[in-house]
Amino acid sequence: AQSVTQPDIHITVSEGASLELRCNYSYGATPYLFWYVQSPGQGLQLLLKYFSGDTLVQGIKGFEAEFKRSQSSFNLRKPSVHWSDAAEYFCAVGARTGNQFYFGTGTSLTVIP
Amino acid sequence: EAGVVQSPRYKIIEKKQPVAFWCNPISGHNTLYWYLQNLGQGPELLIRYENEEAVDDSQLPKDRFSAERLKGVDSTLKIQPAELGDSAVYLCASSLGTSLEETQYFGPGTRLLVL
């Protein structure tokens, strides 16, 4: 069965600092991989996704993620965090056949001045 | 373009009462999803529709939950009777096609509190 783990429940970074949010998955083959952001009172918004090809994926709002097959990871990064990036971030995995889709438990990001 | 619309945004009911949530997907989106999001957790799929057909309802607690998507557009999710443990956010999402390669667009959710 698929599973996705976000080891960090909560992360605090200073504005302007770099950010890396971790995501590990368990799946028999390479799944579809996604990162979503959820701001208070807002719906989930897709930041980026990986299906195949280049393992470094660029997304919206200056985010990127790198797929590392050997580590079963899909970590999200941003070189310089803005106060508006404070939100909940969810990693998700999807099966290439059958359309099963699972979210991680999320990482809450706080940005301090 | 209008996004996914959900109503109500908030609902407070007493246990054993019925409750219904409504979702209007993005125009032209054939696939509709209902998710349950408990506090501090990621969303969990309850049911997925392709047009009018529920193609994955394996996680829907069918003893008290029901859903419908008449005419393949709007959808309602019902709980009857509600239990304390149903307090959560209920999210609706839609996508253009059936593949997971299609982006899912989420509504703001309905926050349910059962007293």
Image (tube, coloured by chain):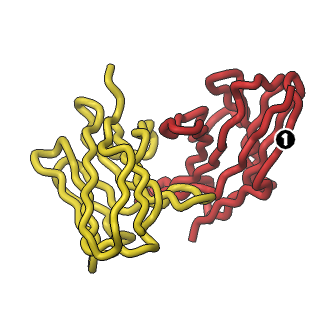
Tell me which corner region of the image, top left, top right, bottom left or bottom right, holds residue B99.
top left
Q: Residue at x 31, y 45 (%)?
A: B8
Name the residue furthest left.
B71
Amino acid type at mark 1: Thr
Measuring 71% from the left and 49% from the top, which residue is drawn there? A107
In which quadrant of the rendered image does the C terminus of chain B lie? bottom left
Q: Position of residue A85 (x, y in %)?
A: 70, 29
Give the labeled residue for mark 1: A12
Percent of width and height locating residue B38: 53, 61
What residue is at 25 percent from the left and 62 percent from the top?
B78
Considering every residue shown, the one lying at the far bottom of the view is B63
Q: Viewer-proximal residue, A87 or A47?
A: A87
In the figure, what tint was chain A given? red
- In the image, is residue B27 above or below residue A73? above
Q: Is residue A62 visible?
A: yes
Question: Which residue is more in the foreground, B87 or A93?
Answer: B87
Specify whether B89 is left or right of A22.
left
Q: Which chain is disc 1 placed on?
A: A
With B114 as the anchor, is A35 left or right in this view? right
Chain colored yellow: B
Q: Position of residue A17 (x, y in %)?
A: 89, 27
The answer to whether B115 appears left or right of B77 in the picture is right
Badge 1 element: strand
Residue A37's spot in the image, x, y percent?
Answer: 60, 38
